[in-house]
Amino acid sequence: MLKITFLGTAGSLPTPYRNPSSILIKKDSELLMFDCGEGAQQQMMRARTGMMSLSSIFITHFHADHVLGIAGLLQTMSFQGRNETLYIYGPEKIDVFIQILTALGYCQLGYEIKTVELKPGDIVEKNGYYIKALKTEHGVESIGYSLVENKRPGKFDRDKAVSLGVPPGPLFSKLQQGNPVEVDGRTVHPEEVVGEPRPGRTVVYSGDTRPCEDVFNASLEADVLIHDGSLDDSKSEWAVESMHSTASEAAELAKKAGVIKLVLTHISSRYTEDESPLLNEANEIFENVVIADDLMEIKIQYKK
Ligand SMILES: [Zn+2]
Ligand SMILES: [Zn+2]
């Protein structure tokens, strides 16, 4: 299972339809949150994602629209009886920010919080996948993230195994695990019946940024790239000044990197009435692009 739920997709200002930035990724039975803008906890309730399996929060930077939801979410989980440790990752000074947020409201949390400072290139190893911190360009201390699954074993050719005299059963699993087996005095090697290792899935989240090299490199053939697409081409100077990206810049990067799907987020409140400039401009460059909506879900399937 690899599912993305967009909890908040607004730019710096929320709108009646868009909450500030927050993305939830369900990886098997675990929930990972990326940024936690105001109202993220209620969006989790609306999306019925549950909270108890939230293991970690990854923060891209400390602009208010990416962190103001943390205090409320932490307190709600405590009221609900959480006792498992919560990990909060982020750029330099994450420990100070979380100390300030947890000091609010006289709330004694019933569980431990572990903060972990990440620099670009740092890797958080998980079971069967990892999260990597990426260097981004937003004018303040900031990082993006990629979630990368380990390679999966190649496809097992059952018919070929049978034709080589291997009986279905425990010897099949031995071969699938990469071990040779003996049949009628002959050795059958895994390479004879197991194909090339197959890629896992990759999701990249840029956070707020100008188009940049590290996000590009992490996005090479990624399944989903969630990129800052705050502005349209007529605001390209403002995109440079405010250190965001235009929809077409995100599309250029997605195209060059060969990503499968591009999702634009951090949508400026200017487009509340009409988002078509963003989508049209991106679409001219890259076909498989969508604008994220609050509560939109994307399930990612394996490529092969
Ligand atoms: Zn922002
Ligand atoms: Zn920002």
Image: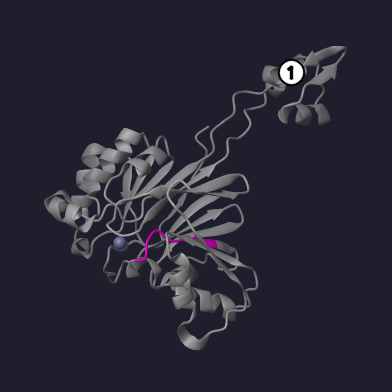
Give the class, few, some or many, for how many residues have Cα within 10 Å of label 1's Cα (few <14, many ≥20).
some
Q: Is residue 116 magenta?
A: no
Q: In screen coordinates, is 199 left or right of 15? A: right
Report ligand 1 position as a quadrant. Answer: bottom left
Residue type marked 1: His
| In the image, the residue with mark 1 has its CB under 8 Å from the nearest atom of ligand 1 | no
Q: Residue tagged by mark 1?
A: 189
- Toward the viewer: 163 or 50? 50
Inspect this view and state whether residue 169 appears: no
Task: In the rendered view, tell whether residue 288 sits above or below residue 40.
Answer: above
Task: In the rendered view, tell whether residue 154 sits above or below residue 32.
Answer: above
Q: Tell me where residue 202 appears, x and y as whole percent.
A: 48, 42
Q: Tell me where residue 43 appears, x and y as whole percent.
A: 44, 69
| Magenta segment | 56-62
Question: Which residue sits at x=31%, y=44%?
Answer: 289
Task: In the rendered view, tell whether residue 92 sits above or below residue 260.
Answer: below
Q: In screen coordinates, is 257 left or right of 145? A: left
Question: Which residue sits at x=19%, y=45%?
Answer: 281
Q: In screen coordinates, is 268 left or right of 66? A: left
Q: In screen coordinates, is 147 left or right of 249? A: right
- Toward the viewer: 278 or 108? 108
Question: Which residue sits at x=60%, y=64%?
Answer: 53
Inspect this view and state whether residue 89 appears: yes
Q: Tell me where residue 187 appears, x and y as whole percent.
A: 80, 15
- Toward the viewer: 117 or 40? 117
Mark 1 residue element: loop
Q: How many marks?
A: 1
